[in-house]
Amino acid sequence: MKLCYDLRAGAAIHNVKVKPKAAVLNMLKRLDKIRFRGPKRDDFLDLPESPTGSDTECSDDMLLRPRPSIRDNDEQRDPASLGTLSVMQDLRSESERLNEVKGHLEIALLEKHFLQEELRKLREETNVETLKQELERERSRRLDLEQKMSDVLKTRCEDSPPQPPRKQQPPAANGTDKQQKETVCSRLQSWLYDRFGVYIEDFRFQPEENTVEAEEPLSAKRLTENMRRLKWSARPVTNFLRNLSALSNWHSVYTSAIAFIIYMNAAWHGWAIPLFLFLAILRLSLNYLIARGWRIQWSIVPEVSEPVEPSKEDLTVSEKFQLVLDVAQKAQNLFGKMADVLEKIKNLFMWVQPEITQKLYIALWVAFISSCVLPYKLMGFMIGLYAGIKFFIIDFLFKSCPKLRDKYDTPHIMWNSLPTDPQLKERSNATVSRRIQPVVSRSSLATIPAGVTREEESGRSHSTKKGAFHEIFNLPENERPLPVCENGWRCCLINRDRKMPTDYIRNGMLYVTENCLCFESSSSRSGSSKKNKVIKLVDITDIQKYKVLSVLPGSGMGISIATPSTQKPLVFGAMIHRDEAFETIFTQYMKIMTTANPET
């Protein structure tokens, strides 16, 4: 429906176009079908009675009822106004129908909601039904199992041999006796369980639970704290061992003399074990008094006050890093000592050194035979006297006279001669190299051609990757590397006199000859010796081990060599075999210096 206005000669002409109402009627029919479907359509209110309806909503009867006031007015009006009134009436009817459509939609939504609730309830009821079915199945299975069990019991009773008939007793007396027996047995069983049930439960075997402890991540703070805890917890043991050592060394003559007299008297009368027990009780009593607040300090050796550690907040980053390195070094040394002790004990019992283990073997046989022959009282008396004399007299003499100890202290000699696993590995490598060296020398002699001497052949063999050795360093032909460093030691030369980065550090190989120290730079061209370095051993004024970076753990991997031609010492750093190179250079340097100045 469209409303058009045409303004011509000051008069308004209204042209109205109304659409067919068939579509609206079809929509209303469909909504009526939606509204009145289902079994619960009577529960819904009619449209005019619905609370959700708007104020302008009305029923179909109200819409079809004529309005007499409007018709009476239409007859009195002119034909032009009749068109406008009909249009307005149609608009009102359309708005009322739209409100009706709105009400039907709301009713449809409510019906949908109720249907969803019913569907949910039905689903719950179906779940209950399935549970009931499963319960019935379980009951039927239980009844079947009971039936099978009763059948098995019947067959067993039939297969068992018949028992002799018992004398029939009066039923009343027999029933009372059974009841009494049952009550007595039940009471006895309950009494035993109440008294001993807890102890019986302890003897039940249960599988062990393999619990894996979570390992803590590596932390410098945690490592430092653990080392400090270990130090404080081991302090009583170290103090006790230090006092024993002071007692054996006669640090306090009066204290050691009194202890020696008391111990020897107790050992002579067979009171050595009661004496040790009494000393343990005395120590515990003193510890109790100290824990109660008493100040009791008794020690043969005066305690050394340790320096107070600075607070961690005042330390710089480098000091904290150095603290961690110190802790790691202490841990490394402690673990190394413990490993040495355990490896020596293991090698003692595994016959790694047969001559040492043989002494222990003979001593054990002597102790076994004497324990079988001699009475225990005499044996204890002898052991007590020997322990006192060994602790107070023999150890004092051996500690005071080291040469006497190295000759006659058998346990000390045996313990020092026991090897550790790294020492055994070094020995095996040395023996293998000694076996291989004669074979190599024989094969090299066989390959030397006729007319060539051994010196010429050895001079030919000593050549680097870039040419002959004497040509690269401009040395005489008889100058060649020592056998220890035939292949050279890889290192880097740090010349602190130079300012250019390319000249400050050079990578290369270090060789030692009879008279010179030669460094071959890896960046030098073939045949050129500009970047190579030759230092005569006679010109060296100082040689020592050097640590390039002080923040790194260990003693370093460098060698510092001072010569008159350089203001600052030359440093050969990053040497893996630093100790071997230092020993070779130092021994060759000492040989040349002794030959040059025999008086010194």
Image: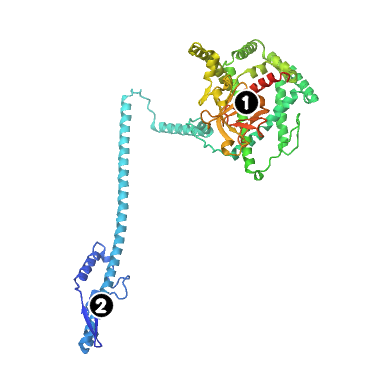
Residue at the extreme bottom of the image, as rendered: 76
Write down the residue under mark 2. Answer: 91
Q: Is residue 434 above or below residue 302?
A: above
Residue 67 showing in the rendered view: no
Name the kind of residue labelled 1 in the image. Answer: Phe
Residue 373 located left or right of residue 65: right
- Quadrant for residue 562, please give it: top right
Of labels 2 and 1, the one closer to you: 1
- Asked if the residue at tag 1 contacts the one at tag 2, i.e. Cβ–Cβ closer than 8 Å, the answer is no
Image point 70% across, 25% down: which residue? 277
Q: Secondary structure at mark 1?
A: helix
Image quarter (top left, top right, bottom left or bottom right) of the N terminus: bottom left
Q: Position of residue 564 (x, y in %)?
A: 68, 30
Alpha carbon distance from label 2 to label 1:
116 Å
Q: Is residue 128 above or below residue 385?
A: below
In the picture, the disc for residue 358 is none
Q: Position of residue 343 (x, y in %)?
A: 59, 22
Of the pair 113 and 520, the residue shown nearer to us: 520
Q: What is the basis of the colouring in this image?
A: rainbow
Numbered circles on residues, count: 2
Residue 455 located left or right of residue 72: right
Q: Earlier in the sequence, mark 2 or mark 1?
A: 2
Residue 54 showing in the rendered view: yes
Q: Residues within 10 Å of mark 1 (few under 14, many from 20)?
A: some
Q: Position of residue 187 (x, y in %)?
A: 49, 34
Residue 275 located left or right of residue 493: right
In the picture, the disc for residue 582 is 1
Name the kind of residue labelled 2 in the image. Answer: Leu
Q: Residues within 10 Å of mark 2 (few under 14, many from 20)?
A: few
Q: Position of residue 71 (x, y in %)?
A: 22, 85
Q: Is residue 58 above or below residue 568?
A: below
